[in-house]
Amino acid sequence: MTRPYKPDGYPSVSAYVMVDGAQRVIDFLKKAFDATELRRYDGPNGSIMHVEVRIDDSVIMLSDGGGSFPAFPVWIHLYVPDVDATYQRALAAGGVSVQEPQQKGDPDRRGGVKDPSGNTWWISTQME
């Protein structure tokens, strides 16, 4: 029998995001995108050393930034069944609008919100 090389149900590629205020980002992801916390390792000082959350079929890994691993804002793209409803949920969860959902010539209707750490989440629904 071969030993699995990754946790069951994990994709081969996951984003790893260093943030300021990992718990605030986790709370935002849960409210905005129904994220589920999978694994978590807290540091001795109470910071989040490593956490993994599932959003639909993907895993995002997060950590509180600091020292030689500073926080760095990123852009992440997420397909959702209803971009307009999800955009509104993200705003209600504390997200800041970057762009209201719109279609710009490709098959996707897309909008964007920033989370509490300044990461931009581009959310889309394929329309055609």
Image (cartoon, helix red, strand yellow):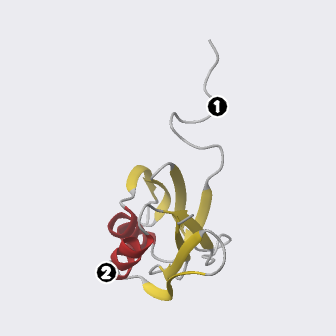
User: What is the crowding at mark 1: few (fewer than 14 residues within 10 Å), some, or many (at least 20)?
Assistant: few
Q: Quadrant of the N terminus?
A: top right
Q: Mark 1: which secondary structure?
A: loop
- Residue ID at (43%, 71%): 25
Percent x, y for residue 68? 68, 71
Asked whether 39 or 77 is in front, the reply is: 77
User: What is the crowding at mark 2: few (fewer than 14 residues within 10 Å), some, or many (at least 20)?
Assistant: few
Percent x, y for residue 17? 59, 66
Residue identified by numbered label 1: 5
Is 69 situated left or right of 52 in this image? right
Asked whether 63 or 108 is in front, the reply is: 108
Percent x, y for residue 88? 35, 79
For residue 44, the mark is: none
On screen, residue 5 above or below 56: above
Q: Residue 21 is drawn in which quadrant?
A: bottom left
On screen, residue 49 above or below 119: above
Q: Looking at the picture, which amino acid does disc 1 mark? A: Tyr
Q: CA distance from mark 1 to mark 2?
A: 38 Å
Residue identified by numbered label 2: 92
On screen, residue 16 above or below 120: above
Q: Quadrant of the C terminus?
A: bottom right
